[in-house]
Image: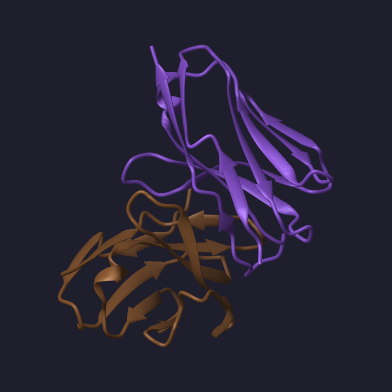
Chain colours: A brown, B purple
Amino acid sequence: EPEVTQTPSHQVTQMGQEVILRCVPISNHLYFYWYRQILGQKVEFLVSFYNNEISEKSEIFDDQFSVERPDGSNFTLKIRSTKLEDSAMYFCASSEAGTQYFGPGTRLLVL
Amino acid sequence: GENVEQHPSTLSVQEGDSAVIKCTYSDSASNYFPWYKQELGKRPQLIIDIRSNVGEKKDQRIAVTLNKTAKHFSLHITETQPEDSAVYFCAASMDQAGTALIFGKGTTLSVSS
């Protein structure tokens, strides 16, 4: 059964550094999403993406964040200048229609 | 915007008992309600979902009910097993690709043998 994959599984970075989180959505899916989960809290929506454009974004997704589909398989989330409060698990998801399938996540730790 | 409340935050049951988790939502436009199971350190896994054109859906030991008038939906797990122990999240959204899932805060279910 195809699954969403994400790399890296863990990332440690210094405050102020840029990070890029990578995702490979399920191959026939056209809608992509990023969510984050701060330790012990609920999953929060960041952004959705379709046809090389942002479809919807939350207020968390400010100017520090950007998304890109650099090629036919990858979907990336960039955080330009990380803050301590960006430490969280970041999940990518993809969908063909309404049902979203999640990747295993990237645990980001900002020091 | 949509807000999803989930109760209880923790639930402990004996193996073989039933477990019920309840969620309420605020936006009457929401029409898609999935449930995800998340084991420690792992991805949320979809276990069942329901759309607003039905009131109940069942898949083996798991069932979900939806009351659109009251804006609440519930997850029912029967004959619980230790491997059911996990965090369960409800969510609500428009049943439309590209729209955000709004999650509840999660219920930690512990099944003891």
- Left or right: A99 as drawn, with respect to B37: right
Q: Which residue is drawn at the image coordinates 80% and 43% (left, top)?
A: B70
Q: Which residue is drawn at the image coordinates 62% and 63% (left, top)?
A: A96
- Left or right: A17 as drawn, with respect to A75: left
Residue A72 rendering spot, x and y as whole percentages:
45, 78
Q: Which residue is drawn at the image coordinates 52% and 63% (left, top)?
A: A94
Please, is residue B18 above or below residue B43 in the view?
above
- Left or right: B66 as drawn, with respect to A37: right
Q: Is residue B29 visible?
A: yes
Quadrant that contains the C terminus of chain A: bottom left
Q: Which residue is drawn at the image coordinates 76% and 47% (left, top)?
A: B71
Looking at the image, which is closer to me, B86 or A105? B86
Looking at the image, which is closer to me, A68 or B28? B28
Residue A81 rendering spot, x and y as whole percentages:
27, 84
Q: How many marks?
A: 0
Please, is residue A19 above or below residue B6 in the view?
below
Occupied quadrant, residue A105? bottom left
Occupied quadrant, residue A100? bottom right
Occupied quadrant, residue B64? top right
Residue A1 rendering spot, x and y as whole percentages:
48, 48
Q: Is residue A26 visible?
A: no
Residue B111 rendering spot, x and y as whole percentages:
42, 20
Please, is residue B97 above or below residue A15 in the view?
above
